[in-house]
Amino acid sequence: MHCHALDLALERHRLTDMRLRTGSAVEETQVAADLYAEDAERQRQGVRRVRTWQTRGRVPHAVDATTVLREALLQSTGDDT
């Protein structure tokens, strides 16, 4: 399952000059796939990567919200280790 809103937010950020400072569009695409993966470890990896981006500067609201929700879901299912 992949989120179209997350893709749109990432693309909008790429088109404006407010970069995520990730290094590449490939990394952004990978993180989106990780956040929506079935595997909890990949989801945690996506959350960690977005948290890293947040230390470097602003991220799109859709990316931030998706990360917060994913983190909450991982915690509620006990997969947040």
Image: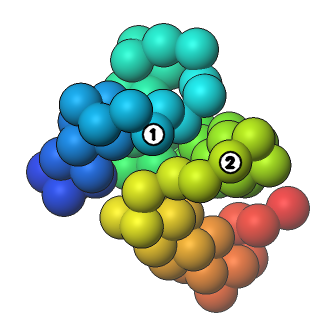
Residue 58 as seen in the image, left or right of residue 11:
right
Residue 48 as seen in the image, left or right of residue 9:
right
Which is nearer the eye, 23 or 42? 23
Q: Position of residue 48 (x, y in %)?
A: 73, 46
Name the residue beneath numbered marker 1: 18
Name the residue beneath numbered marker 2: 57
Work out whether 24 lies above or below 19.
Answer: above
Q: Position of residue 21 (x, y in %)?
A: 60, 28
Which is nearer the eye, 16 or 26? 16
Element type where label 2 sits in the image: loop
Work out whether 37 lies above or below 71.
Answer: above
Look at 47% across and 49% down and name the residue there.
Answer: 35
Quarter holding residue 30: top left
Look at 59% across and 53% down and name the residue there.
Answer: 58
Residue 25 as seen in the image, left or right of residue 48:
left
Q: Position of residue 78 (x, y in %)?
A: 73, 76
Type of amino acid under label 1: Met
Look at 58% across and 14% down and name the residue there.
Answer: 23
Which is nearer the eye, 11 or 6? 11
